[in-house]
Image (spheres, grey):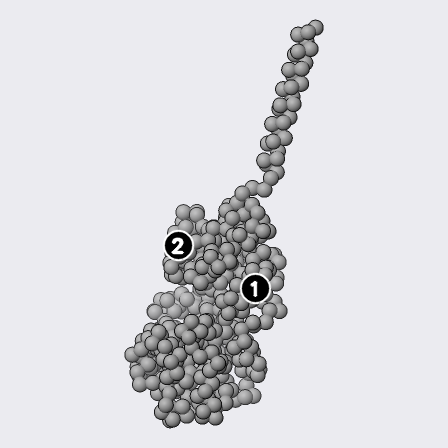
Amino acid sequence: MKKICLLICFIMLMGIGLTGCGTSENVSKEGPEEVTLTFLMHDQFQYEYFTETNNISEAYKKVNPNVTIEVEKVKDTGELENALKIRNSANELPDIMLLKTYMLSNFADILEPLNDTQVAKNNEYAEQYSIGGNIVGIPESAFYEFVYYRKSVFEKYGLEIPETWDEFMKTAQLIKEKGEYIPIVLGAKDSWPDYPYNEFMPCLQGGNGAYWNEMATKDEPFTKGEPFYEAYRKIQDLYDAKVFGQDPLGIGWDQAKSMFVAGKGAMIGAGQWFITDYKNMDGDMDDLGLFLLPVRDTKEDTFYATVMADGFYGTAKEGENKEEAIKFINWYMSSDYYLEYMKEKGINATIKGSEPTNPYLKEAFENTDAKFIVYDGGNKEFKRIGDSFGFDVKKLGQEMLAGKDFEEMMSNLNKRWKEAKNE
């Protein structure tokens, strides 16, 4: 009897032990799993802000304590694209990718559609950058293009903000005649600084941010009467007016920028990012003004201006931590952290209803009737045609400044475009 009692006690104790083990195992399974999300970017300012100034991993842990954000950085956009290609081949894509606009179409097949997320529905521009009906990236910021000018120069000569292309031309020519300042500093030794004219003006002329895509459907888009031709005719007139100083092809962007900051130039064309550059170079902020480039012919015409979204948040379709990555993107784009970062960098948020916080932008928009068109940079067909014969609008600008015959250029472009399109 004694042995039976001992056996019963032993069995009961074993049962308690097993139950205890089972309870411990269940707690482990039901508790929050530790997750590390890799986040790849290229922007130095953003990297420093997210890792040092206001650590994003620490901020997110207040919402999801079990998730760690591991921020990685590559040198530039070219390295970013190459890194994504290599990692995709090895099935090791980062959980969160901060993409440039053109990368959306390049990586659309491997990115998770975000159409049904709240963050996509709350974004002003996400749908307009969809690929094949899928929103594969949520844009972080919106950028505008401006002509920056020295208020003191305009006041000195009694100049008003130009509202038409003719007024813009006359403003530059008057400053040239006075001989005290370079009317517009450019820095065309580097090919890219002419982009406010050579890249964006065809879209402004046509009133279509997706003009490159429309252009890809045409055999001869460089013909008189077409938006590209008409815009480039205006650009050629501007270059022929010699309002960019003695040798715009002899100086690069850094030198041109320094000349404007030093007060040697009256105007310079650039995106809103230039405000930060100007400030960091100790430019006179009280003397800085901005206006939108007026491409229209008359004040009765619609005043088109470009806005371009940038910094697209996406995650891999086959990503191991896809759901957690989407949760993070939803949190970030609706958080105070995001708005604080936008303000710190001086750029515009893309959530619906957001207003510019930068006082220079507010002033530039205050008295304008501009209609903003979203610039998308061109689809695959446009890129296919252009890449096949080295079509580069910025290099075209350099050639125009160097004196290449305009009509010959347009005719040659028509020929090469048509051949490439129909290959």
| Amino acid type, residue under disc 1 in the picture | Leu
Per the image, label 2 sits on a secondary structure element best described as helix
> Can you give x and y, in whole percent of width and height, for residue 340 in the image?
55, 64
The answer to whether 7 is drawn above or below residue 278 in the figure is above
| Amino acid type, residue under disc 2 in the picture | Ala
Q: Nearer the viewer, residue 260 or 400?
A: 260
> Can you give x and y, in whole percent of width and height, for residue 234 in the image?
42, 85
Q: Nearer the viewer, residue 239 or 146?
A: 146
| Quadrant (top left, top right, bottom left, bottom right) of the N terminus | top right
> Can you give x and y, in whole percent of width and height, for residue 413 in the image?
36, 76
Q: Residue furthest top?
A: 1
Location of residue 220 (image quadrant): bottom left
Using the rendered image of the protein, determine whether residue 115 is visible from the camera's viewpoint.
Answer: no
Crowding around mark 1 (Cα neighbors within 10 Å: few <14, some 14 to 19, many 20+) is some
Residue visible at 59% across and 59% down in the picture: 335
- Judge from the rendering whether residue 240 lies leftward or rightward of residue 16; answer left or right: left
Q: Nearer the viewer, mark 1 or mark 2?
A: 1
Residue visible at 33% across and 81% down in the picture: 248
Instruction: Tell me the tag on residue 339.
Output: 1
Whichever of callouts 1 and 2 sits on the residue coming sooner in the sequence is: 2
Crowding around mark 2 (Cα neighbors within 10 Å: few <14, some 14 to 19, many 20+) is some
Residue visible at 42% across and 77% down in the picture: 283
Instruction: Tell me the tag on residue 83.
Output: 2
Per the image, label 1 sits on a secondary structure element best described as helix
Q: CA distance from mark 1 to mark 2?
A: 29 Å
Q: Tell me whether circle 1 and circle 2 mark residues in contact (CB < 8 Å).
A: no
Using the rendered image of the protein, determine whether residue 258 is visible from the camera's viewpoint.
Answer: yes
Q: Nearer the viewer, residue 220 or 283?
A: 283
